[in-house]
Image (tube, grey):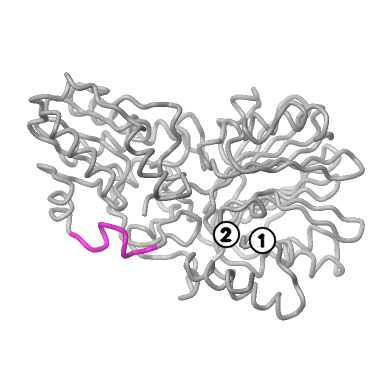
Amino acid sequence: MSKKEYCGLFAIYNHEEAARMAYFGLYAQQHRGQESAGIVTWDGEKIREHKGMGLVPDVFTERHLGKELKGRIAVGHVRYSTTGASLIRNAQPFLVRFGNIQMAIAHNGNLVNTLELRRELESTGSIFQTTMDSEIFVHLIARHLHNGGVEQAIAKACERVRGAYSLLILVNNKLIAVRDPNGFRPLALGRVQDAHVLASETCAFDLLEAEYIRPLEPGEMLVIENKCVRSVTLGDPAPTRQCIFEHIYFARPDSTVFGEVVYENRKRMGQILAREAPVDADFVMPFPDSGIYAAVGFGQESGLPLEMCMIRNHYVGRTFIQPSQTMRDFSTRIKINPVRNMIKGKRICIVDDSIVRGTTIRSRVKKLRELGAREVHMRVCCPPIRFPCFYGIDFSSKGELIAANNTVDEIARFIGLESLHYISVEGLLSSVQAKDAWCLACFNGEYPVAVPPESGKACLENEIALSW
């Protein structure tokens, strides 16, 4: 199984072109999900929505942005499924109405007690419209609305769920943002003119020329209403456990995520790799795009030249985002193409972000051999992935993780390498600023939030499918 992206969030409050701003905010975060996209707006009287399957430019037209999605508040979402099938009904934001309240919710992350809560809610009359764990929040919020306002209801809902979540919730004229107590998923606050903006990554702010203010804190609920911003801390304090894969792979290099610059951290990973595992090679070569910045650091530290021997076709999406294995295999073949004359007779050191199953890199190394490479070495800027992730990245099957079942030497032989070295956990942590604020469960199996045996994606989807 390849890595799968999760979701990207964007919201803007008090802007005359809120829908158009949301469109560009999602466009900047398209790398976070290419399966579906949606925007919901509030025009002062009612919520309006448009969602669809596919890329942001394919889902929205000028008619949607200029005429239909009216209002000064907008919430947007791009998605790849971590739980829930690839269906239009699972596209977000998820929109509901009860009484005089109209609410839209967009979620990035993954809950580990979805089955438990879904069974409980269904047994007391809740009817689910999707297979998403995100819908759990809607039903829990609805249960508590009669005991207080919407903010109290959201706080009560967050007390019941366990796992990873960054939320954007539009409730009539109020915009609410929430991060889980461990802070697994990113969410940042910005400002453009008189409007407040929120996004998973700051690259969305850059496109809109918005000022980056700060990341939301773990366990923080931010409420924006009538140009006033209030911050509330939810629940008991918990250890901060941010997803370090944002900096290894997922986030755009021009983003600031969890308050740290992605580009700088990736370059440091490469520099540390060069110190941990020097190599006698003719040049360093990344596979675009995720390995480029670590390769820059590796080349600078080692003194080896950096060569771009693989050229990416930018009209092909990230291979792991495609929802079918058939499409993924096809995309892998056309995604990058070698500069043949650079490879023959050379000793090459590949620098890449990670190895999950090993099948993709094996086929690429085989191609380098066919083109006449004399030696192929590899340096990887994350430790071996040995354990599945239950917080929103689809490392969901330990049996398919090559490092869970093989030694480094065995992996090197499988791929066809002269040498292979992964960055150490200590080296990885020295490449980021915060030293004790990261989730490392996919490397060491130490899960910050306890994971029930039934919390795996396959288990969840199998049970939900039986009820549909």
Residue 327: image location, x then y, percent:
42, 44
Judged from this view, the residue extending furthest toward the top is 341
Q: Is mark 2 on a helix, strand or loop?
A: loop
In the figure, is residue 45 to the left or right of 9?
right
Image x and y of residue 9, in percent: 62, 43
Label 2 – label 1 distance at C-alpha: 7 Å
Q: Residue 437: which numbered mark, if any? A: none
Residue marked by disc 1: 130
How many tags in the picture? 2
The secondary structure that dominates the magenta segment is helix
Q: Is residue 270 magenta?
A: no
As displayed, is residue 121 above or below residue 47? Answer: below
Q: Say whether marks 2 and 1 touch (CB < 8 Å).
A: yes
> Which residue is pictured at 17% across the width and 33% down the height?
368
Stretch in magenta: 397-406
Q: What residue type is labelled 1?
A: Thr
Q: Residue 401, how many percent across, how many down?
A: 30, 58
Q: Residue 84 carries which label?
A: 2
Q: Mark 2 Cα within 10 Å, few/some/many (few <14, many 20+)? A: many
Picture coordinates of residue 63, whole percent (x, y): 77, 28
Q: Assign a secondary structure to mark 1.
A: loop
